[in-house]
Amino acid sequence: MGQIVKLIELVGRLAELDDEDTIYAREPWTEDSDAMVAREDPDRKPYGIPLEAAEAGLAYFLEVSIARDEVLEGWIASLDEKPTLTAICQQLIHYATYDAFLEEQHD
């Protein structure tokens, strides 16, 4: 655990990640932000950010289970075609920032 990679790489591996883990990423969030997956540390106050993530300058992004099950599952199912990895990453960044879904752009 605790290996720093780009946020888009973690997004591409969401299906492999443990539901109990949380994604931490360097702000401002972009697909190229440094990120890691780690288990929340309930003993670390005030936010439970694991020491390795805090020392790397990373902030809470989203729990894996929320990213995968609550944000992406329904959104992807509602689309006519499979979104690109970049579009998925943008949707998660928007959700993590605004606690809301990114609105579809229609011509």
Image (cartoon, rainbow, N blue to C red):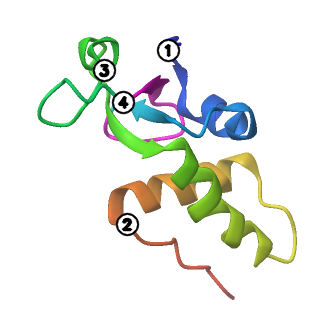
Label 1 neighbourhood size at 10 Å, few (<14), some (14-19), many (20+)? some
> Mark 1 is on which residue type?
Ile
Residue position for label 1:
4
Q: Residue at x 87, y 69 (%)?
A: 81
Indicate the secondary structure of the residue bearing disc 3.
loop
Work out how far the residue at label 4 is from the one at label 3, CA to CA, in angstroms: 6 Å
Q: Residue at x 31, y 14 (%)?
A: 56
Label 4 neighbourhood size at 10 Å, few (<14), some (14-19), many (20+)? many
Q: Quadrant of the C terminus?
A: bottom right
For the residues bearing labels 1 and 4, Cβ distance under 8 angstroms: no
Work out how far the residue at label 2 is from the one at label 3, CA to CA, in angstroms: 22 Å
Q: Which mark is residue 30?
A: none
Tell me which segment is drawn in magenta: 27-39
Work out how far the residue at label 1 is from the one at label 3, CA to CA, in angstroms: 13 Å
Q: Earlier in the sequence, mark 1 or mark 3?
A: 1
> Mark 3 is on which residue type?
Pro
Residue position for label 2:
99
> Where does the image place residue 58, in percent across and percent down from the top left?
31, 26
